[in-house]
Image (tube, rainbow, N blue to C red):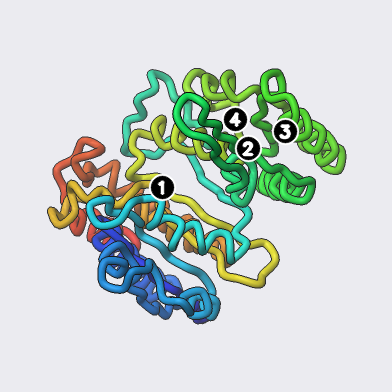
Amino acid sequence: MKNIQLAVIPGDGIGKEVVPEALRVLDTLSEVHGGLKFDAIHYPWSSDYYAEHGEMMPKDGLDQLRQSDAIFLGAIGDPSIVADHISLNGLLLKIRREFEQVINVRPAKQIKGIVSPLGNPRDFDIMIVRENSEGEYSSSGGRVHNGEDEIVIQNAVFTKKGVSRVMEYAFQLAEQRSGHVTSATKSNGIVHSMPFWDEVFSEVSEKHSNIPTNSEHIDALSAFFVTKPHTLDVVVASNLFGDILSDLGAAIMGSIGIAPAGNINLNGKYPSMFEPVHGSAPDIYGKGIANPIGQIWTAKMMLDHFGEPEMGNVLLEAIESSLEAGIKTADIGGHSNTKEVTDAIIARIKK
């Protein structure tokens, strides 16, 4: 059995409720199926930590995390304590950037036991691969002047290295799946970065001539997520477009509370980080009703990352089986609490 040193950051709000539940599931999987054993090291970095120390993590926080094999994050943010741009830049985005987590991967698939808001979802199964380090979220730009003369410039930075890297990852992923890659673009409106994106996509596509491809403008592609998601397999997108499409993917699944994500480091120098898409939901924190499936499905992505797809598939089957049995939290039409959902998943893993 391989020991994995897991840095655990529950963070804020419901992160402090769902992370322990997901760890219970991982411990059960380890006991029943072997393969991996997770040695969790807990870090209390959060908005509460900021209120006490004036920073989201200590000065040597990254050095502490660097020793781990992966980071398991709950949720960050409590605007009643600290502004979101401070909390995110002080912890979540700092980890992504400093640890070169240049790829963000988010699945969107029809889950058994959850009714999609789509009239005819037709068993869609999409993997969104988002560039995670540059693009429209680059911090290049600034503001000058005041009043009606004020000027704001936000620069979108696209590099050949960054764009090629995310596209190569998408093609490698497609080779393990249905084998089709769709590129999200907007070259008919964004006249510099998106034609460049298209050119690189064409170059990378030539290296993977066995994989069918197509390129769709982001507005049309957003519509396709709703009208024909079953036609999509791997979707590769820039930082902003990938962010929007992955939230849309969560919506067509039925709830953002079930959606997982992985922030992937490719060079092996630093740990990757796994987190659910949902936020800290301070309005329901402490009530025991948070949906733990997003965090638990995130654990499945982490198992896949460590080369244990069989354990991951067992976990996803247990999730779907419990949902089909009607064991759900209120956000997806059920009456169960957080612990009851986790208990049901654990019981099915043991079977």
Q: Amino acid at mark 1?
A: Val
Residue nearest the viewer, comparing 160 with 267: 160
Residue 281 location in percent, x, y?
25, 48
Q: Which residue is the site of mark 1? A: 277
Q: Which residue is the site of mark 4? A: 232
Vertical placement of residue 226 versus 269, above or below: above
Crowding near the residue tagged with mark 4, few <14, some 14–19, many ≥20 C-alpha atoms within 10 Å: some
Residue 57 location in percent, x, y?
40, 71
Q: Residue at x 31, y 67 (%)?
A: 50
Mark 2 or 3: in front is 3
Q: Which residue is the site of mark 3? A: 193
Residue nearest the viewer, comparing 331 with 231: 331
Mark 4 or 2: in front is 2
Residue nearest the viewer, comparing 260 with 56: 56
Crowding near the residue tagged with mark 3, few <14, some 14–19, many ≥20 C-alpha atoms within 10 Å: some
Vertical placement of residue 281 versus 185, above or below: below
Looking at the image, do the residues carrying marks 1 and 3 touch, with CB atoms under 8 Å apart?
A: no
Q: Earlier in the sequence, mark 4 or mark 2?
A: 4
Crowding near the residue tagged with mark 1, few <14, some 14–19, many ≥20 C-alpha atoms within 10 Å: many
Q: Which residue is the site of mark 2? A: 237
